[in-house]
Amino acid sequence: MFSLKSSHPITTPTLIPKSLLHLHLHLHRHQQQHNHHLPLTPKLTPPHRLVIRALDAAQPFDYESKISDRISKSSKLKIAVIGFGNFGQFISKTLVRQGHEVLAHSRSDYSQSASNLGVQFFRDPNDLCEEHPEVILLCTSIMSTERVLGSLPLQRLKRSTLFVDVLSVKEFPRNLFTQLLPRDFDILCTHPMFGPESGKDSWKGLPFVYDKVRIGSEEARISRCERFLDIFTNEGCRMVEMSCAEHDRHAAESQFITHTVGRVLEKLNLEKTPINTKGYETLLDLVENTGSDSFELYYGLFLYNTNSMEQLERLDLAFESLKKELFGHLHDVVRKQLFGSTESN
């Protein structure tokens, strides 16, 4: 796109009266006769200048640039992370990298860690809530969730605030949210099936379970929930929508059993050997992975998932059944050694 600029103004032609036209012609002839006796000098006329400006690049006043910037900003969220320990910091790195505004609060002072990540840290939850975050993301331990939720000044938040948890159990926070939060607040229960160790390189292909427990019907609230879920979709997570009850049934069979077996093996003080098999290496990795999590987490998986006790009893019965099978075979071998010759007769 170009713009043309002339150094002389362009005037619109007008009709000239005949009397003035004759006078103009007479004066023009007289001037020519007078100039005939003067030496010739070059006639100088101001040149017409063309000013060319390229407008291909986006300008600050450009409409398309403004719309693009507005769309980009509208997709970003103001998220308050409550509980800024290992997992809170782990997830905040991705939130900041994606361009979201991240606030944080924790019982301990993580102001320096937050500053390093580009997160604004608040020691007082009242100050944080007065910032009116769109999303409250609880990254607390299972055992402390009820206490932390009860300590938040909910009256300082906007009435339509979205509450999200990331606990390893789901029915517990769902019941807690529905009981303690005002009806105007939205509720999204989630469980990223990964952590700082398993997700340190990439989240691609890792499962992210969620249940839209209570989301308002307004378009803005539906959009906000989807934008939060897009955080994990954009990282390549395998998105799994599942009810909280169904999640806990599956988690008891998988996560709780995994942690239990890993902690049982940890009690054996297993060590590496010069002849490790692949299977044994897998067991050592299991011990290391489960041992890196706190016992409080394991206890929370047991206490706040009603399916865990059943799985623990099944595991105990399975171990007893396996021992009986082993001793049964041993009994047959010993019996044959002791009485084999006599019974054959």
Image: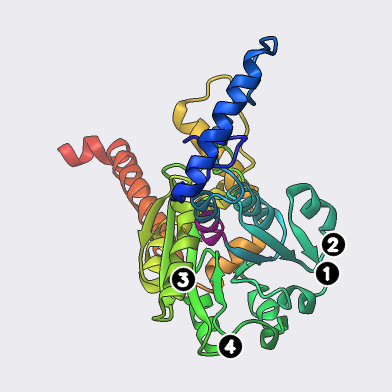
Q: Tell me which residue sits at (54%, 34%) in the image.
A: 26
- Residue 180's tag is 4
Marks 2/3: CA–CA distance: 37 Å
Where does the magenta region start and end? Answer: 70-76
Q: Which amino acid does label 1 sit on?
A: Arg
Within 10 angstroms of label 3, few (less than 14), some, or many (20 or more) residues?
some
Between 182 and 336, the residue placed more toward the observer is: 182
Asked which quadrant contains residue 240, the reply is: bottom left
Position of residue 55 in the picture relative to residue 129 (left or right): left
Q: Is residue 321 above or below residue 3?
A: below
Marks 4/3: CA–CA distance: 27 Å
Between 1 and 257, the residue placed more toward the observer is: 1
Q: Mark 3 points at which residue?
A: 309
Q: Tell me which residue sits at (50%, 54%) in the image.
A: 231
Q: Is residue 52 visible?
A: no
Marks 4/1: CA–CA distance: 23 Å
Which of the two discs, 1 and 2, labels the residue nearer the N terminus?
A: 2
Q: Which amino acid does label 3 sit on?
A: Met
Within 10 angstroms of label 4, few (less than 14), some, or many (20 or more) residues?
few
- Disc 1 to disc 3: CB gap under 8 Å: no
- Residue 109's tag is 2
Between 138 and 342, the residue placed more toward the observer is: 138
Position of residue 85 in the picture relative to residue 185 (left or right): right
Foreground label between 1 and 2: 1
73 is within the stretch colored magenta: yes
Q: Name the residue under label 1.
A: 123
Which of the two discs, 2 and 3, labels the residue nearer the N terminus?
A: 2
Q: Is residue 238 above or below residue 273?
A: below
- Residue 201's tag is none
